[in-house]
Amino acid sequence: MPKYLVTGSTDRGTYSLQSELPGMGVEPTPQAVTSLLHFIDLQRNQAISEVQGQDWVWYLMDVVFRGEWGLVRALMQFSADSSVLVTDIENLVLGLQGKMLPKTDLVHGDMGFTQVLLQNGAVSGVLDWNQAGYGDVTQDLMSLWYSLLGYADSRDLVLQQALQQSDREAVRIHAAYKMLADVSWHINKPGGDAISAIARARIAICLIRQT
């Protein structure tokens, strides 16, 4: 994990200067992804205290089942395609609002493969821990899975791990949150590619329906 040397903000957003970490980004081969899965496994039962980070379970359950924080509303209002997408995502998690998710793990919050540096085949650094909190590490597994949708072997490896270490219901909830978060981010960001984001979510829905 890098150290934050300088943080600040301008009228264009926030910024941070972090210490340099060894390693480099690589192609998400199954071997590289396996190294990251070992790293993520270290986050289990390592929850940080409530005053140090976000309660990810509370937040994502609010987003997925109560439409809070505007993510669902943004999709409902953006286009007919995104509105239908919301309905399909809701159907994935129908009846799961009472599901209890653990809050015992350290959660990165945005564990895409592009956040990872590797050196000599091992994870040497993971970037952007500013959203770190506590919750269910399945969230990071499904975030990683979502970032690998175009790499079938690596993608399936992550999903298999998530299903083995958690369960089908938790996997669906975390996948639903990631879809909503990704599409709404592109809708709200200037220059975002909402059409591609919706198409990506459609692929994810088809894959999750098969679990």
Image (spheres, helix red, strand yellow):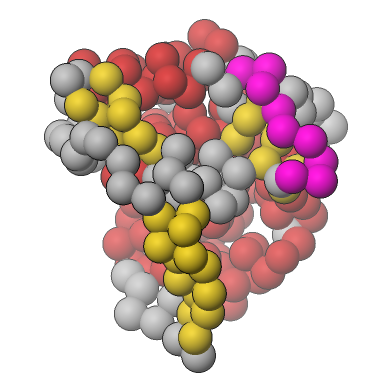
Q: Is residue 44 above or below residue 66?
A: above
Residue drawn at x 37%, y 60% as measured from the top left: 197
- Residue 113 visible in the current orientation: no
Viewer-closest of 60 and 103: 103
> Is 45 a magenta residue?
yes
At 31% from the left and 41% from the top, the residue drawn is 21
Q: Whole-percent x and y of residue 45? A: 68, 17
Residue 58 lies in the magenta-colored region: no
The secondary structure that most of the magenta stretch takes on is loop
* Position of residue 76 in the picture relative to residue 54 (left or right): left
Q: Residue furthest top?
A: 164
Q: Report whether residue 99 is seen.
A: yes
Compared across the picture, whether 1 is left or right of 138 comes to left
Would you place residue 181 above or below residue 170 in this image?
A: below
Which residue is drawn at the image coordinates 48% and 29% (left, top)?
Answer: 141
Judge whether 71 appears above or below 189 on screen: above
Where is residue 14 drawn, in percent x and y?
50, 74
Magenta part of the protein: which range?
44-52
Q: Is residue 59 left or right of residue 188?
A: right
In this picture, is 170 found above or below 79?
above
Residue shown at the point (48%, 65%) measured from the top left: 6
The quadrant the N terminus occupies is top left
Judged from this view, the residue extending furthest toward the bottom is: 11
Q: Kindly indicate the quadrant of the structure image that contains residue 17.
A: bottom left
Q: Position of residue 85 (x, y in %)?
A: 51, 57
Q: x, y (%) of residue 158? A: 38, 22
Q: How many labels does the image show?
A: 0
Quarter of the image where one finds residue 108: top right
The answer to which of 95 and 120 lies nearer the viewer is 120
